[in-house]
Amino acid sequence: MKRFASLIAAALLGSLMTLAGYEYFKKDEGQKVQYIAQPSLSKVNYPAGEGAVTVPMDFTAVAEKVTPAVVHIRSTQARSTREQSQQYDPFRDFFGIPRNYGPTQSSGSGVIINESGYIVTNNHVVADADVVDVTLNDNRSFKAEVIGTDPDTDIALLKIKQTGLPFLAFVDSDQSRVGEWVLAVGNPFNLNSTVTAGIISAKGRNINILERNTTEGNTAIESFIQTDAAINPGNSGGALVNMNGGLLGINTAIASPTGAYSGYGFAVPSNIVSKIVEDLMTYGVVQRGWLGIQVTSVNSELVKQYELEVNEGAFVSGFAEDGKSAAKEAGIKEQDVVVKIDNQTIRSSAALIETIGRHRPGDKVMITVNRKGKVVTYPVVLKNREGNLSVVKAEERSGYASLGVEVEDIDAKELKKIELEYGVKVKSLGNGKLAKSTDMREGFIITKVNDVPVKSVKEFNELMKKKKPGELVILTGTYEDFPREFNYAFRM
C-alpha cells in the first residue's frame, strides 16, 4: 500500500513539474515550443533554422483516413504441390505429377487504388492461387479476379465487382526523404487493420530477394524504400503511407533472422507500382523498356581497378547480345559509368534499374555517362526484351502468364533436325505453377496439350485459355538432348 501511495505521489509530482515548466516557457517571450493544431496531424514545431525538426504527436487522423482502403487477402490453392515423401512412384515419375495433400491457404494484404474495385498487392500473395478472397475493412467479402502479375517487381493487380470504395491515391515516391515519418498498414498474423509507425530509414535498397530470370539476366527490379515501421508476415501487399495519407509504396519484405519483424521492412516505391498498374490495366502485361546492359554499383574496388573518376553511379560491365542492346547502339561503352538518366541522378545499379523500369519500349531517355572523367550524354530509344520496339500483347503471353512459363515457336529446320513435325519450345520456366509442380526443364518441346497437337505459340495459348481452375493438364513432348517422350501433368 505504501508502495502504491509512493507511485501516486511521484506521478502527481511529475505532472506538477510539467505544468510549471509549461507556464514558465509560456511567459517567456522567446517561447521554445508551440502547439499548433493541423487539419490532419498534430505536431510539435521547433523554430526554423539549423537543427529544426517536426515531430508527429498524433497519427489518428492519418490512420482513420487510410485504414478503410487496406484489405485482407486470402489465397487458396486447390491442391498442395509440396512433396512429403521421396519414395519412388513409377506413375508419378512417368506423368510428372506431385503428390497432393489437399488445399493450402496463405494470406496477406492489399490496397484499393480506385473506387471501381482495383486492388494492388504482392505477386507472392496470390501466386499459384486458384481462388482469391478479399475482405474489406467493413468485413464485406468478395471473390477477386487476378488482372495481372509482375514477378520482377512482386506486384499483382486484382479486381473485385464493387464500386464506390474508399481508396488511396499514389504520391511521388521520389519526393520522399530519409527520416520522413510513415505508417505501415496491413494484416500481420491475420490481425486485421493493424497500423504501425516509423520513418523512412533508407531508399533505393537492393536486398536480392526477388527471383531472377536466369535466361534473360537480371530482370528483377529492386529499389525498395526501407522503413523501421513494424512489418510482419501478413503485411505483404499492404500500404506504406506518408503523413498526408498518400500511398508511398507497397510493403513487400522484411530482413529478419527469425521470420518476424526485427527492425527492417521494405516497400516497392509508388512510382514503380503506379507504372506496373497502368500497364496491367491497359495491356494486361507489363511493358518494360530495356537498355540491354549489365551494370553494377560503383565501389572503391572498381574505382581503383578501372581508374574511374567518380565514386558513385552504375558501372557498365557488358551488353546484351547483338541487336538487343539499345545502349550499345546509342554509343555507350563498357567501363562507362551511368551518372544520370534524364534529370534523375543515378548513384547505384538499383537506381538505374528502377528508373529504366518506369519506361516502356519506344521511350526515349537521355543517358549521361562519365567516361574516364569525360561527361557525355546519349539519347537512347529503349527496346523490349526481344530487341525491338513492339508492344507485348496480352494475348501473346496469356497462355503462360498463369503458369510462369514462356514458350516460343520453332522453325521448320530445327524441327526437322529433331525429327518432329510440330511443337513449341519452353524458353523460360519462371517461378510459376509449372516450375513448382513438375520437374520440367527449360528447352522442353511441347508437342501436345491433353493429346491435342500444338503447332504454334498461338495454339498453345488458345488451348491454355480454355482450361478451368483445378482441371488436370498433361503436356506431352521431348527434349532435344534426350529424345524420348515425356509427360508433365499439373492442375490449373
Image: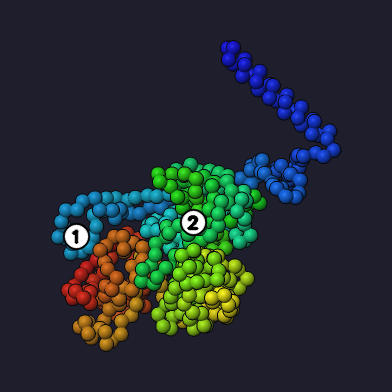
Residue drawn at (72%, 50%), measured in percent from left and top? Answer: 50
Which residue position holds label 2? 121
Q: Which disc is residue 92 wearing? A: 1
**Element type at marker 1?**
helix
Q: Residues within 10 Å of mark 1 (few under 14, many from 20)?
A: some
Where is residue 296 shown, x and y percent of the image? 46, 67
Distance in Å between CA atoms under marks 2 and 1: 35 Å
| Sequence-first tag of 2 and 1 | 1
Residue 76 visible somewhere in the drawing: yes
- Farthest-out residue, bottom: 413
CB atoms of marks 2 and 1 within 8 Å: no
Task: Quadrant for the C terminus, please.
Answer: bottom left
Q: Look at the picture and state if 417 lies above or below 57.
A: below
Q: Helix or strand or loop: what does disc 2 sit on?
A: strand
Left/right of residue 183 with respect to residue 133 in the rendered view:
right
In percent of width and height, residue 482 lies at 19, 74
In the image, what residue occupies the spot 48% across and 61% down?
Answer: 222
Q: Is residue 12 left or right of residue 374?
A: right
**Circle 1: residue type:** Arg
User: Where's the N terminus, which quadrant?
Assistant: top right
Among the 4 quarters of the image, the one containing residue 151: bottom left
